[in-house]
Amino acid sequence: MINLKISPQAKRVHLPEVVGKGYGTFWNFKGRYRVCKGSRASKKSKTTALNIIKRMMQYPEANTLVVRKVFRTLKDSCFTELKWAINRLGVSAYWEIKESPLEMTYLPTGQKIYFRGLDDPLKVTSITVEIGFLCWCWIEEAYEIMNEADFDMLDESIRGAIPEETGLFKQITLTFNPWNEKHWIRKRFFGEITGKDAQGNPTYKFHDSWISPDGQIYATTTNYLCNEWLDTADLKVFNTMKENNPRRYKVAGLGGWGIVDGLIFDNWREEAFDYLAISKKPDVKSAFGLDFGYTNDPTALFCGLVSEKERTIWVFDELYEKALTNRAICDRITGMGYGKERIKADCAEPKSIDELRDAGLHRIRAARKGKDSVNNGIQYIQGYTIIVHPRCVNFITEISNYTWAEDKFGAKINVPIDDFNHLMDAMRYGLEDMLVGPAFSFD
């Protein structure tokens, strides 16, 4: 039981009833880095949101910075989770919530929760709080940050002395799905240096859950099994995944590290660029591809530029969202400014293509099918350099995990996995004419 400091009287909250179990050490840890990798439905984001609201109301001089790699992804993720946490704790009367700009204020004290994206680093490093101190930072979907130097910049911005008598502490919380075992987060927070190899490089012992000897890191792994609020339908999703896709279940079900072996595309890099300047080059053409999804899979729009002369593909934007009706797809694409572009869509859904054309996407067409179309498309794209803008976080996640499938003996076969392929398929659809001409098509 805790007392939340609310004027004019305290509100008593029984945390186990509100938060649930499985996060006791995470909830109470006060070291510099608090890191949680977990499966889907593991409560990691909701628990973090509840913890931030509780802490803000407990410590009257603390402020919080919430960060994702791309600012536009915050509203439908962390911002929504924190609103849910405020309502879950029954304290909505004490919070002012603004959407323009994204900001939350605890009314009794004026403390604030700020929201920033690493795509505007100046706004991250220049935050000045009005009351108290900037104490805490939450980085959601931290795997999106591919460059460790970007994290270091953020880490350095949460600095400065805090008077000891306040009882405050500084902490960065990272939550993420562990898709890639080669991500820098694994060594930095889950790896304990045990020595050096013959070349002088550090050797590591890796932990699923541990507190570092200096007490500054708590890194842990959680999964859906600690979520006592999942119903039968929720559990069925994971049981089906366990049976039909054990590779994905290891990561999305149990929170284990994704082992990335046999990547289909290794000819890519993340790099910021001015797509308007590139589009003005005489030989550069635009390419848009659409892969349909709804309940379990996202609708994915690939937005790219292609130069056959430079053998380069620039990926400059994306749509990646579940539960979109055809009308909503049209509205999203039009709102992104691409409603008049020529879009190639998955030909398996001719009715959806017709509906989108009637709704206003007049230049949408079905991608063609052909023999060996998937592998032919992959082969041609492998001959290009792919430059991905940092804002395209879902494209980066997919291309980092898109691998060849394995046979029952564990040997790689010439078939892509049926996973991390929504934007990969959309890319093939969008590029079919420019990369391989009319002789080939893609399914």
Image (spheres, rainbow, N blue to C red):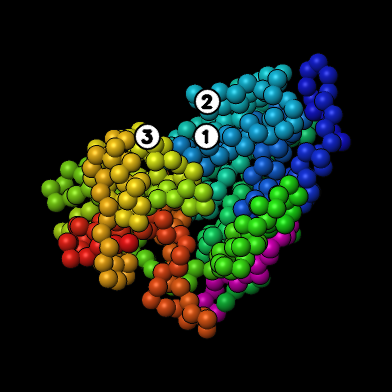
Which mark sits nearer the N-terminus, 2 or 1? 1
Residue 113 is situated, as x and y percent measured from the top left of the image, at 61, 30
What is the C-alpha distance between the residues marked 2 and 1? 8 Å
Residue at the image point whose x is 79% and y is 49% from the top:
21
Residue 208 appears in the picture as rendered: yes
Residue at the image point whose x is 44% and y is 58% from the top:
398
The quarter of the displayed image where residue 317 is located: top left
Please state which amino acid type lies under the numbered disc 1. Answer: Lys
Lateral position of residue 131 relative to residue 201, left or right: right
Dot 1 corresponds to which residue?
A: 75
Dot 2 corresponds to which residue?
A: 99
Q: In this picture, is 338 found above or below 57?
A: below
Image: magenta residue range: 198-211
Q: In this picture, is 247 found above or below 188?
A: below
Q: Nearer the viewer, residue 121 or 441?
A: 441
Residue at the image point whose x is 55% and y is 79% from the top:
198
What is the C-alpha distance between the residues marked 3 and 1? 18 Å
